[in-house]
Image (tube, rainbow, N blue to C red):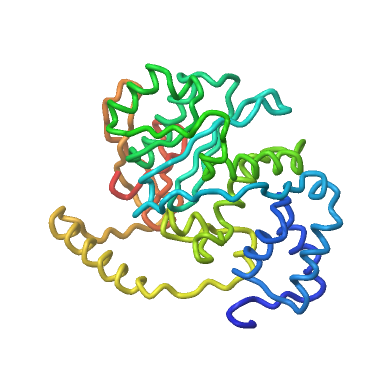
Amino acid sequence: MFANKVVIPKSLRKEILETLHETHSGIVRMKNLAREYIYWPGISQEIEALAVNCQACQEAAKMPVKVELSPWPVPSKVWERIHLDFAGPCKDGKTYLILIDAYSKWPEIFGNTTTSAKDALRHLDWTFTRYGFPKTIVSDNGSPFQSYEFKSYCRSKGISQIFSPPYHPQSNGQVERFVDYFKRMMMKNWGKPKWVEEVLFNYRATPHESLMGKSPAEEFLGRKLRTKLALVYPERPNSNDSERERIRSKMKTWFDKHHGARVREFKIGDKVQFANYSKSKNKEWLVGHIVAQNGVVIKIQSERLRAIVTRHINQ
């Protein structure tokens, strides 16, 4: 270990670099991810050389910013303000709906064949079912977001809309930067299976400079994502484990006391009754003999059914 990071031997460094470079996420993001888990002398220089010598990375390199952007105010919490935009049509024939949480930088990506309000709302329904409704949605003045259907949806959920000026996508910079990143990732990863999922996972797991070194997942979910690099990093004991075990034990004691639970012991060959659930959903009790047991799960040989059935001890 070196400064709480795993020191990688020379024999494994090539494989680690390939893992860091899987989605061609760029020099800064590869370094940020590496600093979370691993170290060896000269790792930064090797990451730089890897990206510089990658043809896909060079062809998709970002153009310099031409004007200074006016930043949005930072929200006070996660999922308070989200930014939306469409990217495409792309080379796969799809147009992607991009969503970014302004506080955590957590992204969502949805593939579409159209840019209709109906498609956008279908994906927002999926998202809001999991995370709840934001206070504000920021988008451009595109017809899907200006439609009566979209505006009515937002009003019904208590969501306010803010529109960026026409023909000035930089005003919606939160999502515009990710759209640019997404397009470059498409150029670098085109042809790979499940590249969208891999790009999303990598982005969510990588420390973000605007988040003071935390990843979008840490800010959004309150925890780090378990990545391939985490496999080389020894797990640290959680200080809350003992308290959780105490609560779990207390709950078990309460359940056993109030539900008449007791210890049941069986051995191979014991004759037992077990519940048989027929297609008519009527339960009947049959007799059989135990042929195997694994904890609270037992296997019973039933002469009537001419089969071995698996049951919980309570069944």
Q: Is residue 63 above or below residue 140?
A: below
Q: Is residue 276 above or below residue 238?
A: above
Q: Is residue 126 above or below residue 49?
A: above
Quadrant of the image containing the C terminus: top left
Tell me where residue 241 sits by quadrant.
bottom left
- Give how far across and how far down residue 140 sits, in percent: 50, 30
Quadrant of the image containing the N terminus: bottom right
Q: Residue at x 43, y 36 (%)?
A: 138
Tell me where residue 150 sits by quadrant.
top left
Kindly give the residue lying farthest to the left in the view shown. 258
Left or right: 160 as drawn, with respect to 89: left
Tell me where residue 43 sits by quadrant.
bottom right
- Give how far across and how far down residue 128 sits, in percent: 38, 36
Kindly give the residue lying farthest to the top in the view shown. 148
Kindly give the residue lying farthest to the bottom in the view shown. 2
Front residue (pair 99, 4)? 99
Front residue (pair 47, 313)? 47
- Give how far across and how far down residue 272 sits, in percent: 31, 46
Q: Residue at x 79, y 49 (%)?
A: 57
